[in-house]
Amino acid sequence: MQKNPEIKAVFFDIDGTLMSFKTHRVSNSTQKAIDILKEKGIYVILATGRSIQSLEHVKFLDFDGYVTFNGAFCLSKQGKVLHKQAIVTQDIQNVVEYAKKKPLSFSFMYEDDILINDVTKEVAGMYAHLNLPVPDPVDLDNAILDGVLQTNVFLPPQEEPEFMEKIMPNCDSSRWTPLFADVNPKGMSKRIGVETFCKHFNIDIKNTMAFGDGGNDLQMIQAVELGVAMGNANPELKDVADYVTDSVDEDGIWNALNHFKVI
């Protein structure tokens, strides 16, 4: 029998979930669904690997909170910092030293800034994929090593395990694209964001629901009571989700919320 818990908060990934990679916009059906959720008093919370500075294109949806940097930086609607955890400085230093010896593209993402060391075809492609302007590259040898909340490391998936073990042992990595890995402090994930907002709003995690499509959504989808994978999600996420809906371009969010009678 399909479970239909009383939902009090819904968490949404952005890219490939709220926003289509084809149109770079939020569909009318998704906007309508979010309006209905808010009318019913259900909290609507963003959960993304993006920085807080890269959300202007979706802030019109009037979220009740923001889980950014895959959980490393959580903010209330009013801008109050509810959770913040930076990467161990030694791991960041290791990345800089590694890049002096071997070709490596990477970014350092801070609360209010993003620094990248070079703009390769892969880096430019990633920013185009996200419909974001490409930052000017800077000399990261002079970058501040403290306060980095996330780094994006552009290396093939097969090289990721050894890199993480030797260069960033105090961190965890996740992927939603073959182009790069999101790297965050060890133990950090969107699950931390879910738990942070459950505490903030004084609600039980059994009354939560989440939508996602990528590897960095995995722990969030497993943490909530009702985890929904988009039809365009990767196979690993679909395997652990409670329900697989239609794709982002086929009204997947609207259809799932209707299926579970949340709206």
Image: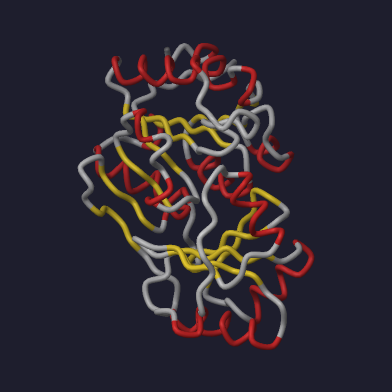
The x and y percentages for residue 77 are: 25, 40
Look at 59% across and 21% down and name the residue there.
252
The x and y percentages for residue 243 are: 62, 26
Q: Nearer the viewer, residue 16 or 83?
A: 16
Q: Is residue 23 above or below residue 198?
A: above
How many discs appear? Answer: 0
User: Left or right of 180: which side holds 79?
Assistant: left
User: Left or right of 2: which side holds 196?
Assistant: left
Q: Residue furthest front?
A: 136
The answer to which image quadrant residue 69 occupies is: bottom left
The answer to which image quadrant residue 208 occupies is: top left
User: Left or right of 59: which side holds 188?
Assistant: right
Quadrant of the rendering where the N terminus is positioned: top right
The answer to which image quadrant residue 214 occupies is: top right
Look at 52% across and 75% down and name the residue there.
170
User: Left or right of 79: which side holds 253?
Assistant: right
Q: Nearer the viewer, residue 132 or 67?
A: 132
The x and y percentages for residue 100 are: 64, 87
Q: Residue furthest right?
A: 158
Look at 50% across and 51% down and name the residue there.
49
